[in-house]
Amino acid sequence: MDKRYRVLIGKPGLDGHDRGAKFIARALRDAGFEVIYTGIRRTVDEIAAAAIQEDVAAVGLSSMSGAHMRLFPAVVEALARAGGADIPVLGGGIIPDEDIPALKNAGITAIFTPGTPIDTIIEAFRAACRTHLGQQAR
């Protein structure tokens, strides 16, 4: 990877389970990304503000609490209000298959469920960052 992409990993809402988010953050870092981790129990506005302030190329969200249908789209909306409508949002966690189409329609670029290979997740982040930055696939 020639460019060191900057991404933000966030845990919106009251979900206190962050092992998966930390695993993804570490895997992205090990793959050459610069990772900002906001920590647990952040509001959607805090995540959006951090994404804008840190000038990230993508935002990754994690939800294990079942609130993904409300929180993930709310982050997309908060980013738009903050001037970051073009920042791709990717999400993962305990997400039923039947929720995935609605999340994608709400602007979530990619959804990862338990068992998704880490290489698949890393490549999805690379693709999202390239798209955001207007780069050609390599």
Image (cartoon, rainbow, N blue to C red):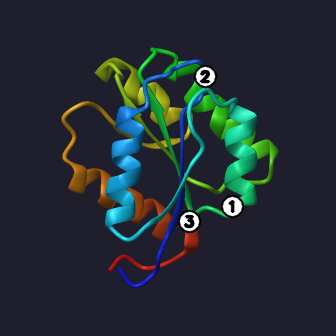
Kindly report the distance in space between the C-alpha atoms of the residues bearing marks 1 and 2. Answer: 21 Å
Above or below 31: residue 49: above
Please give the name of the residue rendered at 71% of the width and 50% of the height, measured from the top-left corner. 50
At label 1, the amino acid type is Glu
Front one among 132 and 46: 46
The reply to whether residue 8 is visible in this rendering is: yes
Q: Dot 2 lies on which element?
A: loop
At label 3, the amino acid type is His
Say whether residue 113 is left or right of residue 60: left
Residue beneath label 3, please?
132
Tell me which label, 3 or 1, sits earlier in the chain.
1
Say whether residue 73 is left or right of residue 19: right
Tell me which label, 1 or 2, sits earlier in the chain.
2
Picture coordinates of residue 114, whole percent (x, y): 24, 30
Picture coordinates of residue 40, whole percent (x, y): 56, 31
Quarter where residue 96 is shown: top left
In the rendered structure, find residue 29 and report the number of the disc placed on it.
Answer: none
Please give the name of the residue rendered at 41% of the width and 21% of the height, measured from the top-left corner. 64
Residue beneath label 2, please?
13
In the rendered structure, find residue 54 and report the number of the disc placed on it.
Answer: 1
Where the C terminus falls, by quadrant?
A: bottom left
Please give the name of the residue rendered at 52% of the width and 17% of the height, measured from the top-left corner. 67
Q: Residues within 10 Å of mark 3 (few under 14, many from 20)?
A: some
The reply to whether residue 85 is visible in this rendering is: no
